[in-house]
Amino acid sequence: MSSATPHSEQAADTPTAIACDIFCAVIDNFGDIGVCWRLARQLASEHGWQVRVFVDDLHAFQKLCPSLTLEHARQTVGGIVVEHWHEPAHAGDRLEVADVVIEAFGCELPSIYVAAMAARERTPVWFNLEYLSAEDWVADFHLRPSPHPRYPLTKTFFFPGLGPGTGGVLKERHLDGARAAFEASPTARRAWWQQTTGHAPPPAAATVVSLFALREPRRRQPARTMAR
């Protein structure tokens, strides 16, 4: 890490932990920050990394993380430092470069941050996290290097995917066990349905379809048709 620790709130008890900065520009509703927040939480909880998330839209983020405070430019949520990336050139209240830098979905890092990466004694590992795709070409481009045109830096493209040769998908260690416990508990299922939909759960033999879509009137008709 640089001389200033980017996650000073946690540095005292994990001084040798890998520091990681994730930059996220919210473009696609909750998808961008949803993936970044899930990745941040997994890196912190399962691997012990010190994670800092730069995000430009705290309002969208708060929908997924209600404990987030909109008025704070820098805060710690669940052991993860969150910086409000309020303008493209902003790189935090203090310019600090992490060991691993993740540029989510081609959001483009602040130029001052890239220059600091190049000046760092130990060059950070730099990833461009791409969107999940099931197309065949993903395996050919996963982990391809991209040298910077001016600095001695190399960005590596990371492509999540569903087949061999790709980056796979995010999956927490406890996910299978938690899902099995949820499905085996009528009480847990009843509470989830009531809280999420306001209705009692459907019969056990019913076919349940989850539809993720933007809030558009034309989406309602297919849902009504399937419900018949």
Image (cartoon, helix red, strand yellow):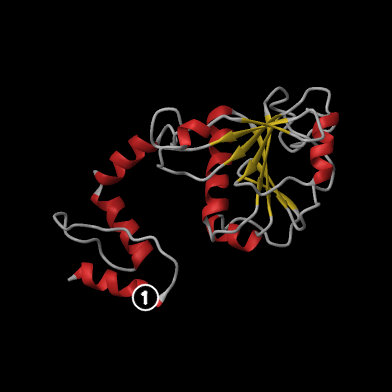
Task: From the viewer's side, name the closer residue of 93 and 76.
Answer: 93
Farthest residue to the bottom: give it.
Answer: 217
Give the amino acid type for the residue marked by disc 1 in the picture.
Answer: Arg
Please indicate whether residue 22 sits to the left or right of residue 193 in the image: right
Task: From the viewer's side, name the closer residue of 113 and 166.
Answer: 166
Query: Is disc 1 placed on a helix, strand or loop?
Result: helix
Q: Residue at x 34, y 68 (%)?
A: 198
Disc 1 designates what residue? 218
Q: Position of residue 174 (x, y in %)?
A: 40, 34
Q: Residue at x 51, y 54 (%)?
A: 31
Q: Position of residue 155 (x, y in %)?
A: 67, 33
Q: Residue at x 73, y 28 (%)?
A: 124
Q: Position of residue 105 (x, y in %)?
A: 60, 47
Please indicate whether residue 206 sits to the left or right of residue 162 in the image: left
Task: From the viewer's side, name the closer residue of 176 and 76.
Answer: 176
- State the image quarter where residue 148 is shown: top right
